[in-house]
Amino acid sequence: MAATDRSSPTTPPGSSPTTPRAEGSDRELADLEAGLDALETRTPPDAPRWGRLVRTKMVPPLVAVALVLTVWQIAHLSGIKPDYVLPGPWDVWNEIDTMWRRGTLLDFVWTSVSRGLLGFAVAIAIGTPLGLLIARFAVVRAAIGPIVTGLQSLPSIAWVPAAIIWFGLSNGTIYAVILLGAVPSIANGIVAGVDQIPPLHLKVGRVLGARGFTAVRHILLPAALPGYVAGLKQGWAFAWRSLMAAELIVHSPDLGTGLGQLMENYRTLSNMSGVLASIILILLVGIAIDLLLFSPLERRILRNRGLLVRAGG
């Protein structure tokens, strides 16, 4: 009597039958692939793009400004200080409006902004190669690295008396203070960026023949870009602060009137509304430069590297 064949007639020769475990693994793999696909799929936003921008980008700072103005007005009305010492927001606004009507407001702002941008550009030209030298050569780092770090912590206003002796009451004094304040921050920023580059990137570059300026242009600077941009942002902050410190002290009819000199003029006249108006203008310029230049640049770099997620998918 022939033996009964218990093997499945649908199983092809040479292949193993499908088991429940294999079927479960296939389902898990399919679920994993579906999940990864869902991560890459752009989900439709819940609200229009402008609505999200207004809600997340415009409303919070407006609420903060309104809160500050409210506290300021309450302090003014409480009489804790005389009006000539603590003017109200409306008094300060009237001072800014007066400068605008006289046609001098933009001149004051442009005098300082043009000085700051020119000094910052020269600081980039000096601080970038200096930072690369410190980052790439151990001898240079040991020799001047601590000095550059120490210069970064030195208050910019400390350079003003020495710069006046060196260059007199001239633009040279102002630009010298800007450079001494901004160059160390830019140099240290690029050093930090280069130090964070994985060694494998540098080895691959050498294998591919990248040497000298080619390696700097195509490997070092692109890889160190996040740290470099952070150094540039900090360098601008130091440049702007250094400029205000220099303008507060260096006075000459040939130099024109910047925001720092304007604030000192108001202080001489004991015009507290003008002093506060000058401070607000200095603050607004700093915020505008960050919003128009550095913040978009940082977002673009982070987004290109996959480190920043777009709102709404």
Image (cartoon, grey):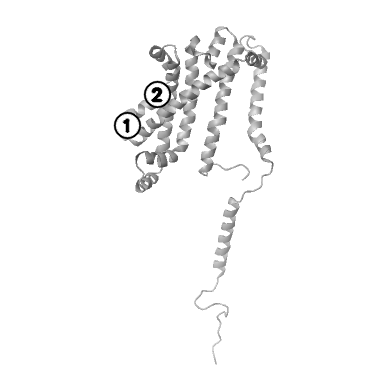
Q: To which quarter of the image does residue 97 belong? A: top right
Residue 307 visible at all: no
Gap between marks 2 and 1 measured at Cα = 16 Å
Q: Residue furthest left?
A: 139
Q: Are marks 2 and 1 in contact (CB under 8 Å)?
A: no
How far across and down, in percent of the image, does residue 196 sit?
42, 39
Query: Which of the two residues, 1 or 231, is positioned nearer the viewer here?
Result: 231
Q: What is the three-letter code of the residue carrying label 2?
A: Leu
- Badge 1 crowding class, 10 Å Cα cut-off, few under 14, some 14 to 19, many 20 or more, is some
Q: On the rendered image, what quadrant is the C terminus found in?
A: top right
State the mark number for residue 151: 2
How far across and down, in percent of the image, does residue 103 sit?
62, 15
State the mark number for residue 140: 1
Helix, strand or loop under label 1 = helix
Which of the marked residues, 2 or 1, is nearer the chain's N terminus?
A: 1
Q: What is the three-letter code of the residue carrying label 1?
A: Val
- Picture residue at 47% right of the left edge, 20% below the top: 242
Q: Residue furthest top?
A: 269
Query: Which of the two residues, 270 or 303, is positioned nearer the viewer here?
Result: 303
- In this picture, residue 122 sits left or right of residue 311: left
Relative to 281, say whether 221 is above or below: below
Q: To which quarter of the image does residue 289 belong? A: top right
How far across and down, in percent of the image, does residue 275 sit?
58, 13
Residue 108 visible at all: yes
Helix, strand or loop under label 2 = helix
Q: On the rendered image, what quadrant is the N terminus found in?
A: bottom right
- Picture residue at 54% right of the left edge, 67% below the top: 22
- Badge 2 crowding class, 10 Å Cα cut-off, few under 14, some 14 to 19, many 20 or more, is some
- In this picture, residue 39 sits left or right of residue 154: right
How far across and down, in percent of the image, does residue 112 sit?
52, 19
State the mark number for residue 198: none
